[in-house]
Image (tube, rainbow, N blue to C red):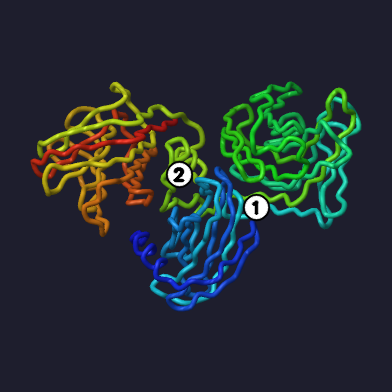
Amino acid sequence: MKKLLILGWLLLLAALPAQAQQNLTLFMPETGHIDSGGAERWTFSAVEGSVLSFLVQGTGEFDPQLTISNSAGAVIIANDDYQYPASRDALLEAITMPRTDTYTATITGAGSASGDYTLTMLAGYGQISLSENFNGAANWSSAVGPVETTVEDGSLRLTLDQAGETGTATDDDASIPAVYFAQVSVSVEPAHDNWVVGMTARQTSSRYYLLAINEQGQWRFLVRDGGVERVIRDWTPHPAIIPGGKTFTLAMLVNGTSFDFFVNGGLIGRLSDPTIPDGGTLGLAVQTSASRPQAAARFDNLTITTPLLVDGAPVLPTRLIVSAPATMALELQRRNVIPAGGDMALTIAESFAESARPGVDRFMLGRGSSFTRLALGTSFTWEAGAAGMTGCGLVLQQTDNDHYLLAYADRVGGFGLARREGETFQPGIFGEKPITNKTAYHLLVVVLSDRTLYYVDGALAGSLDTPAITGAVGNAVVNFEPINTSCRFADTWVWRWN
């Protein structure tokens, strides 16, 4: 894996000459050319909570680099080679946009290289599994209820003419993967009011999940199993759903027992349910109420995206957007770093640790609670009473005072992840950033069943092939010299799963 060059990219971008910006459109590949030492910039708008992927493919030997920045010019995430050395393409997959804004995707060449590239922005994941614009022959047909399906004028029209009914249509020839993001454009016909439209997941002849949106600006999620409906979340309003609005996009991210729901790109809800664990297909739906016997809606531009795989496994992200604990835990799941599901087991808004002794002083959290598979994160700043080597960090997998895993960063840009066994620390992950007198860091440790990942300021610092060990967690002061050091931790959190 190449060394992370985010700081260098920031300096490079600041020195690049101004150039006209071009607009990006979802699912529309854009081509460009980079002169030696040059850059091209593409702008796009995104709402808070939307999930987007960006793939930059170089032509020939060209090695593209991708940087995403906000309207203030701050870099929020970047990537160079997602599969080095097999591929030099750049990929940012299933990133959660931190706020509603106009963003810029900047393409440069590694080492001031020149060449041609193709840039594609996708909703959800980085690979298109299905794209249906209903402009030709389609295999969609009625699956549940007395619904009439018609492919006309470049859309799929669903019509119900009976009160109190649910009608769904599916394409049984479509191959639906286990993990996917599906998005469709919806247009409710003007003559109909009190409407309900939706999308189904894991649908068979007698079972499905249904995400429904109604005219009152509300959403609902239910499961139908063996002819019995169970409401998982009843009608709930959300600002992203405009009451009375009849044209919008509807999307669903499906991953294991977890379901994320989106309207016009914005996240409206997230739920978990194990009733239908896998299988089935995707469907589109309309409903009528007891007082309204008719409903009709058109669906268009149905696109399903799936994670891009390398050797049969999802791409491990080398960069994460540092954000609030719940958002980071959600992004780890969406980007397939950790399994879907789990819960936030610990959150501590602020904590302090102080020590003047050389070595590692640990301050345990969670009243001795133990964890096995987990994501442990924190942000910290510190003050030292004198010049010298000091730092702060996290402790996890502690079974006693001489057995634990330590993740730390120090004031001269050094960082590490190592296990203490008795009187010594075992070989682990160690590195340096070209930064001196740095006093603020974000650390994230992800413990999987057979591997531990370490992220420093959102950048993957490395991994250890070690089994998960059950133990306690805590904060730490790390002194290489006898210096009075005070560490201030913010938003320390633990996300755990089975």
Which percent across, then down, holds residue 319?
42, 52
Q: Relative to residue 32, is residue 232 depicted above or below?
A: above
Q: Check disc 1 and report its element: helix, strand or loop.
A: strand
Whether residue 414 sits left or right of residue 371 in the image: it is left
Q: Earlier in the sequence, mark 2 or mark 1?
A: 1
| Dot 2 alpha-carbon crowd within 10 angstroms: few under 14, some 14 to 19, many 20 or more | some
- SS at mark 2 in the image: loop
Q: Position of residue 447 (x, y in %)?
A: 36, 38
The image quarter containing residue 121 is bottom right
Q: Residue at x 68, y 36 (%)?
A: 202
Residue 211 vs residue 43, the one in the foreground: 43
- Number of callouts in the render? 2
Q: Residue at x 52, y 46 (%)?
A: 99
Q: Is residue 391 visible?
A: yes
Query: Quadrant location of residue 178?
Result: top right
Q: Position of residue 8 (x, y in %)?
A: 35, 64
Q: Which residue is mark 2?
A: 337
**In terms of depth relative to the viewer, which is nearer, 279 or 98?**
98
Q: Position of residue 438 (x, y in %)?
A: 25, 51
Q: CA distance from mark 2 to mark 1?
A: 21 Å
Whether residue 1 can be seen here: no
Q: Which residue is mark 1?
A: 129
User: Amino acid under label 2?
Assistant: Val
Instruction: Please tell me in which quadrant of the rendered image residue 144 appears.
Output: top right
Neighbour tally class for label 1: few under 14, some 14-19, many 20 plus, Cα within 10 Å: some
The answer to whether 403 is drawn above or below residue 89 in the figure is above
